[in-house]
């Protein structure tokens, strides 16, 4: 089975055929989004997994700020489900995006039953950011990242993020804390640009502000992510 980055019109027509059949039989599938699929085809943002020249899965995607990829649609042909095809197809897609130097993949779990699959692919649920964002929005870093720690007692070098604005944080501990050292990888975390961010080094607070004002020269944000390296 092979990942096609540049499918032909013939592949597109075969996908349309199975989507129509699925819609007629089960009233499910993504034929209702056919115009989106066609647009992705013309924008060269349609990936197809095929076997013996037959498409057995496809994904529509979009590039956001040339920094991360957003998967809009992901579907496996009904006859190939529950056979490991989705997992193998996703692995190919992840490699494809890594080759483009994207830092993360973002998606919305639709239908809701797909949430289990994306969790198995190690996707992480978005925190509530105060926007009209779908509840089942997930992401996965494609780079090595500095993961939050549970116990920051005794830490003298750390980065702290609250899921609150600065005026709201009284008596609230940070939601996320990262240990900072020269050997650590960048922080990548979905955030609201108005949330409070604090950097402490050698036990002294170096910076303490909203994410969007934290470092005006080197903005530590790639909407909707906080992306920052501290040395």
Image (cartoon, rainbow, N blue to C red):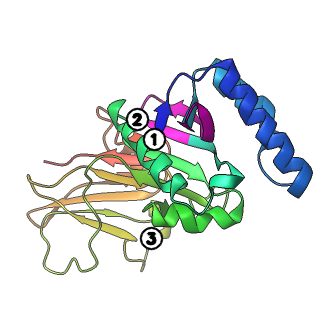
In magenta, the rendered stretch is: 50-70
Q: Residue at x 48, y 30 (%)?
A: 65
Label 2, residues with CA under 10 Å away: few <14, some 14-19, many ≥20: some
Badge 2 is on which residue? 96
Badge 1 is on which residue? 93
- Nearer to us: label 2 or label 3: 2
The earlier-in-sequence mark between 2 and 3 is 2
Cα gap from disc 1 to disc 3, whole angstroms? 40 Å
Dot 2: what SS?
helix
Contact between labelled residues 2 and 1, with CB atoms less than 8 Å apart? yes
Look at the picture and state if 156 lies above or below 217. Answer: below
Cα gap from disc 2 to disc 3, whole angstroms? 41 Å
Look at the picture and state if 64 lies above or below 42. Answer: below
Q: Residue 17 vs residue 83: left or right?
A: right
Q: Residue at x 62, y 35 (%)?
A: 54
Residue 55: x %, y % from top left: 62, 36
**Who is closer to the viewer here, 83 or 16?**
83
The residue at the far front in this view is: 52
- Nearer to us: label 1 or label 3: 1
Mostly what secondary structure, the magenta segment? strand
Asked whether residue 51 is drawn in magenta, I would say yes
Label 3, residues with CA under 10 Å away: few <14, some 14-19, many ≥20: some
Residue 182: x %, y % from top left: 8, 52
**Who is closer to the viewer here, 197 or 82?**
82
Q: Residue at x 55, y 37 (%)?
A: 50
Badge 3 is on which residue? 169
Look at the picture and state if 155 lies above or below 223. Answer: below
Residue 87: x %, y % from top left: 48, 55
Q: Quadrant of residue 79?
A: bottom right
């Amino acid at each position: 089975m092979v990942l096609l980055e540049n499918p032909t019109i013939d592949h597109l027509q075969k996908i349309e055929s199975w989507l129509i059949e699925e819609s007629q039989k089960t009233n499910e599938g993504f034929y209702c989004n056919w115009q989106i699929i066609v647009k992705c085809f013309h924008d060269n943002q349609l990936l197809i997994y095929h076997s013996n020249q037959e498409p057995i899965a496809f994904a529509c995607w979009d590039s956001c700020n040339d920094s991360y990829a957003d998967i809009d649609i992901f579907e496996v042909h009904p006859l190939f489900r529950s056979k490991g095809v989705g997992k193998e197809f996703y692995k190919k897609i992840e490699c494809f995006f890594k080759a483009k130097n994207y830092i993360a993949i973002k998606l919305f779990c639709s239908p809701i039953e797909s949430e289990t699959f994306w969790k198995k692919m190690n996707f992480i649920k978005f925190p509530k950011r105060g926007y009209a964002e779908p509840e089942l929005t997930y992401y996965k870093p494609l780079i090595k990242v500095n993961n939050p720690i549970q116990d920051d007692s005794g830490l003298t070098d750390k980065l702290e993020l609250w899921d609150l604005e600065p005026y709201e944080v009284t008596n609230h501990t940070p939601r996320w804390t990262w240990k900072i050292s020269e050997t650590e990888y960048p922080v990548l975390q979905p955030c609201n640009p108005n949330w409070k961010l604090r950097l402490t080094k050698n036990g002294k607070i170096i910076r303490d502000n909203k994410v969007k004002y934290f470092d005006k020269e080197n903005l530590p944000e790639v909407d909707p992510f906080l992306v920052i390296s501290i040395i």
